[in-house]
Amino acid sequence: MQTYEQVDNYMKEVGLKYVKDAKDLITGLAIRTDKAYTEEVARELNSRAEGKPADSTSFYKLKNKNFDGSVFLSAAFDGGVFRHIGNIIIDNAERLGKEVLDLCCDCGIVTCFMAKNCPESHFTGIDINDSAVENAKILAEKLGLTNVEFICSDVYELDLGKKFDSVTSFRSLLDAAEKQTAGLNYIGLRSAREETYKKAFAPFADAVAKHLKEDGFVLSVERYTAEYGWLGWMEALAEQGIYATAESGLMRAQDISSVKEYSVTYAERKNKTEPLEIFNTSLSKQFKSGTGYDGGMAEFALYYDSEGEISFVEVHRNNRVIHQYSVAHSKSGKGMYYDASNDVRKIKYFNLKKEESILKDIEKNLSLYDESIYEIKRFQA
């Protein structure tokens, strides 16, 4: 992607470089740090790759044990998304105002970028990790910045006794709300699922609202997307009277191993547009009726393009939805078949003459579930 000169120059100054693969990451880390730290990080990353339970708090403590290591790891995993964030910040520099609060800032890479490019403004970065805060202070000193400060605090206990012109959050929500979102359904009726995410994000939205001026501006780039969570996040902000604007949307960025999707939320109190309208407007820009989709766009197609009621069949176990089948009629007169599990969700359009065959296939799939273990729920919405 093309980035602004300020972004490229900052990346070079700080040492943010793309990393091609895991081998390149470990080699680069060893060059910049020491053997013990490199081995510790490698063990943690291997454990995650094997699917063992991951604790974000522990990882960020490990990441920030070493300043050079923290910056290098940020580049490895976030270099791609930072290029996008940098461009967004440059485009919205005037909207940030004179006093900016950056929540869950980690080692301060984005906070310091904002401070460097908005010298007339003052920035306050917050993070719960004391080592991350110390690294952020080191980075600010290395860059010669005097318009930024960093404070160690839990975002949920934060009370700075003042309000800011803008509050920012960059890739923070997934980690900050890790405990609140643990065990929540990834699939299921969208309104019910997003309601649970709204409740999970409510404390974070409260922290934003508590520190935002009445005419303040919110800028948030998060890993919660249309697949699940983004609508809930916008709804959590709306509960605080802070509404996402029409410029909000989705973006994609390369990390060490793949292309990841992110939500970009611009929000303010004076706007009153409902979150679902923003959600639909954003995704409809890349939607084409009659096309099969995977992931978040598959579910979006089901709700956005259906006419009349949608028939749902869900497989539950221990109060969790593990599989969902849906059949609906599209606005163009075709049938829609939606198949979703925790790993995959997809939708396909079909000629209505094949509807009976589709319904038989669903029943055949359902017969594989032992009803003494699984609960089958059928409903329309």
Image (cartoon, rainbow, N blue to C red):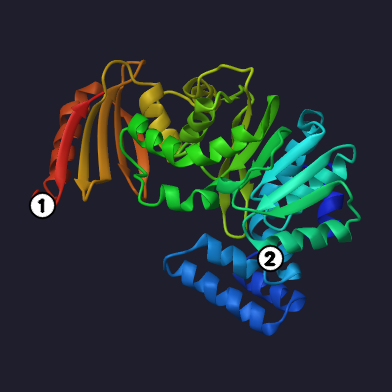
Q: Quadrant of the N terminus?
A: top right
Can residue 5 be seen in this snapshot?
no
Where disc 1 sits, the SS reads loop
Q: Residues within 10 Å of mark 2 (few under 14, many from 20)?
A: many
Examine the rendered structure and indicate whether residue 257 appears above or below residue 264: below
Where disc 2 sits, the SS reads helix
Give the number of the mark in front: 1 or 2.
Answer: 2
Classify residue 65 by image quadrant: bottom right
The Cα atoms of the two marked residues, 1 and 2, are separated by 50 Å
User: Which numbered dot is residue 131?
Assistant: 2
Q: Nearer the viewer, residue 252 or 217?
A: 217
Measuring from the top left, give residue 216's x and y in whole percent: 70, 27
> Which residue corresponds to the image point at 79% horizontal and 50% vertical from the top-left?
149
* Direction from residue 79 to residue 367 in the image, left or right: left
Q: Nearer the viewer, residue 341 or 150?
A: 150
Q: Type of residue at label 1?
A: Asp
* Direction from residue 250 to residue 287 in the image, left or right: left
Whichever of labels 1 and 2 marks the residue nearer the N terminus, that label is 2
Q: Nearer the viewer, residue 274 or 50?
A: 274
> Which residue corresponds to the image point at 42% horizontal and 37% vertical from the top-left?
199
User: Which numbered dot is residue 28?
Assistant: none
Q: Type of residue at label 2?
A: Ser
Classify residue 227 by image quadrant: top left
The number of numbered badges drawn on the structure is 2
Q: According to the image, label 1 marks what residue?
A: 370
Q: Nearer the viewer, residue 292 or 23?
A: 23
Measuring from the top left, give residue 194's x and y in whole percent: 40, 34
> Which residue corresponds to the image point at 55% horizontal and 17% vertical from the top-left?
273
